[in-house]
């Protein structure tokens, strides 16, 4: 892996990262080396394409995003032959979720491998066992390869990115460049033909390619090249802290802490010593005094075993916040350009599905386009419509689930509170009441119709629970409430599923 990997840990940029050739036309240029860029670049290079990948900074980033990867994401990495990027970074296995509601909790393990579709290995990408997890300090081959259930993984985001980037750098067909892309170039037919890049010591240089991938992430500058109306909607934020040596109530599980009196809190162990906590805040502008807000609105609801680590983190006073954006996909209609990853499509991070969606899009893209000639821009653009149609079964499930679950879990009115309680009680029934929802969340069941059926089964259960709790005397009111709960449920689910399929 190290043959061509440059040392980007030093303060000055390694000169190898500044010397891309601007006199040739690449098969593909990839803008951005976050999670998706390196996967696209590596996959295409393994398919024999000459690829240039451009990143603002190849130094390890420090971000609170993309730290829990669902089994669907791990499976996509296997299909691409890049799963070993999760190895040797002190990553932690994830075997399922535990949902806390007031003083109760329910465990939701990840699905059985036998219950989901078999894994696809992409020809030319998977070789020499690169679809298999390696043995390391925390991740064991036997657990990932032989256990009957799927596994996810959690890690420090920057370390994972570093590994992905090293894999990309080691590909002979890839040139890695450090620079800031400042413009997307078009020809007289309005086709995208490359990008202009500002490079340290070289100035502004134009690079040309048959196909330019826009993978510049959440705050994408270039998604507007596709459409000026392709703009994310932001209604909430996550405020994050790092807890150290926390006594985790449900080891190896993602934790979702819910309650009738607070917004959702999520938590997962990302290394042997560090646990990420993300606290929802219902506005894109976070409170001016975050510590005070945390003490009042989060601290009282933290499980006892976590309090010591949580209180120390509060004293440390290091908070990071990010907006939670929603952006449904639109078709890639501009010849010569493919927008992918968060630049194209975003959902609520509550369910940790972003990397899984982006990686599964890469898998589909390489399967559909990997062996095609990118210089035939009109043919590629025609096929892009099919790509858009095909990827929606997968993406729409994770995206819609994330938004509607957030509405329930951050319940702002009595109807949503009844749905939140009903949802938790539904999980408590066990069996298929947890086995099916976890398949959607883990990215292993791309079936929007079944998602709708399951969502409305939860709604019905919430209505029945509400009626049972109030008894015969309360019947006139609870029957009226039933209609109101049903309408609320339709409002937090149907428009989002519709939007996922409308374009
Ligand atoms: C608070 C929060 C928590 C999240 N938690 C999870 C989680 O637990 N699990 C999960 O699966 N997903 C999570 N996500 C979503 C996940 O982080 C994204 O889906 C994923 O990072 C998208 O990858 P990407 O490659 O599209 O973009 P990014 O990872 O954002 O990468 C974009 C890259 O482009 C580079 N770039 C940008 N502009 C330029 C330019 N002009 N020139 C050159 N380079 C440029 C950037 O430096 C960056 O490296 C979370 C999101 C948020 C907001």
Image: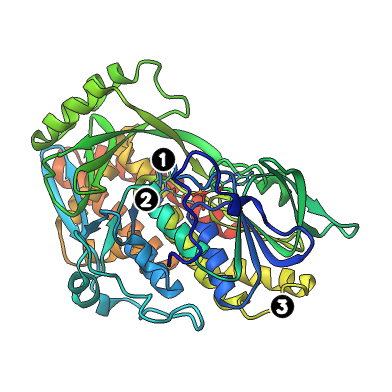
Q: Does mark 1 have its CB less than 8 Å from ligand 1?
A: yes
Disc 3 and disc 2: Cα gap in Å? 34 Å
Instruction: Give the number of the disc on residue 454.
Output: none
Q: Is residue 426 left or right of residue 155?
A: left
Crowd band around label 3 with a 10 angstrom C-alpha radius: few (<14), some (14–19), many (20+): some
Q: Nearer the viewer, residue 212 or 459?
A: 212
Q: Earlier in the sequence, mark 2 or mark 1?
A: 1
Instruction: Give the number of the disc on residue 159.
Output: 2
Point out the frontmost of discs 3 and 2.
Answer: 2
Do residues under tags 3 and 1 come within 8 Å of each other at their CB atoms?
no
Q: Relative to 129, say whether 490 is above or below.
A: above
Q: Relative to 475, say whether 313 is above or below.
A: above
Q: Residue at x 23, y 58 (%)?
A: 94
Which quadrant is the C terminus positioned in? bottom right
Q: Does mark 2 have its CB less than 8 Å from ligand 1?
A: no
Instruction: Give the number of the disc on residue 373.
Output: 3
The image quarter containing residue 126 is bottom left
Secondary element at tag 2 = helix
Q: Does mark 3 have its CB less than 8 Å from ligand 1?
A: no
Secondary element at tag 1 = loop
Disc 3 and disc 1: Cα gap in Å? 36 Å
Which quadrant is the N terminus positioned in? bottom left
Crowd band around label 1 with a 10 angstrom C-alpha radius: few (<14), some (14–19), many (20+): few
Q: Is residue 155 left or right of residue 126?
A: left
Crowd band around label 2 with a 10 angstrom C-alpha radius: few (<14), some (14–19), many (20+): many
Reading the image, the residue beneath label 1 is: 63
Position of residue 150 measured from the top left corner of the image (x, y, whole percent): 26, 69
Q: Nearer the viewer, residue 24 or 491?
A: 24
Which of the colour schemes (rainbow, by chain, secondary structure, one colour) is used?
A: rainbow
Q: Relative to 21, say whether 490 is above or below.
A: above
Q: Earlier in the sequence, mark 3 or mark 2?
A: 2
Position of residue 120 measured from the top left corner of the image (x, y, whole percent): 42, 80
């Amino acid at each position: 892996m190290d043959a061509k990997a440059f040392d980007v840990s030093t303060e000055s940029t390694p000169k190898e990262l500044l010397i891309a050739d601007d006199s040739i036309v690449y098969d593909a240029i990839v803008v951005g080396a976050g999670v998706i860029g390196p996967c696209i670049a590596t996959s295409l290079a393994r398919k024999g394409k000459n690829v240039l990948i451009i990143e603002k900074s190849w130094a390890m980033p420090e971000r609170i995003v993309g730290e829990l990867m669902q089994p669907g994401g791990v499976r996509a990495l296997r299909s691409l032959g890049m799963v070993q990027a999760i190895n040797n970074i002190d990553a932690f296995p994830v075997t399922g979720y535990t949902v806390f509601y007031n003083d109760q909790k329910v465990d939701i393990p990840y699905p059985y491998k036998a219950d989901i579709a078999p894994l696809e290995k992409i020809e030319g990408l998977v070789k020499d066992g690169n679809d298999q997890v390696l043995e390391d300090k925390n991740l064991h081959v036997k657990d990932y390869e032989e256990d009957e259930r799927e596994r996810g993984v959690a890690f420090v985001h920057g370390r994972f990115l570093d590994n992905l980037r090293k894999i990309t750098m080691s590909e002979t067909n890839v040139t890695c460049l450090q620079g800031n892309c400042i413009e997307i170039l078009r020809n007289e037919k309005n086709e995208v033909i490359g990008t202009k890049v500002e490079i340290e010591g070289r100035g502004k240089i134009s690079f040309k390619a048959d196909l330019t991938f826009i993978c510049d992430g959440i705050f994408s500058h270039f998604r507007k090249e596709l459409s000026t109306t392709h703009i994310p909607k932001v209604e909430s934020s996550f405020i994050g802290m790092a807890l150290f040596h926390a006594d985790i109530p449900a080891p190896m599980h993602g934790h979702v802490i819910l309650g009738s009196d607070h917004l959702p809190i999520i938590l997962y162990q990302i290394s042997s010593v560090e646990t990420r906590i993300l606290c929802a805040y219902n506005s894109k502008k976070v409170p001016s005094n975050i510590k005070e807000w945390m003490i009042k609105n989060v601290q009282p609801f933290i499980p006892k075993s976590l309090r010591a680590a949580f209180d120390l983190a509060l004293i440390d006073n290091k908070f990071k916040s990010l907006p939670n954006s929603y952006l449904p996909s639109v078709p890639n209609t501009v010849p010569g350009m493919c927008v992918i990853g968060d630049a194209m499509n975003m959902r609520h991070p509550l369910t940790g599905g972003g990397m899984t969606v982006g990686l599964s899009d890469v898998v589909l893209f390489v399967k559909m386009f990997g062996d095609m000639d990118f210089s035939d821009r009109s043919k590629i653009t025609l096929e892009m419509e099919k790509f858009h149609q095909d990827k929606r079964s997968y993406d729409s499930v994770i995206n819609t689930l994330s938004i509607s679950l957030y509405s329930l879990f951050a319940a702002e009115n009595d109807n949503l509170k009844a749905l939140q309680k009903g949802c938790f009680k539904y999980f408590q029934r066990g069996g298929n009441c947890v086995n099916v929802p976890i398949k959607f969340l883990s990215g292993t069941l791309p079936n929007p119709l079944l998602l709708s059926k399951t969502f409305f089964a939860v709604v019905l259960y919430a209505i029945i629970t509400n009626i049972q709790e109030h008894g015969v005397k309360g019947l006139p009111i609870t029957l009226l409430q039933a209609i109101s709960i049903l309408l609320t449920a339709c409002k937090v689910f149907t428009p989002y599923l519709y939007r996922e399929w409308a374009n």
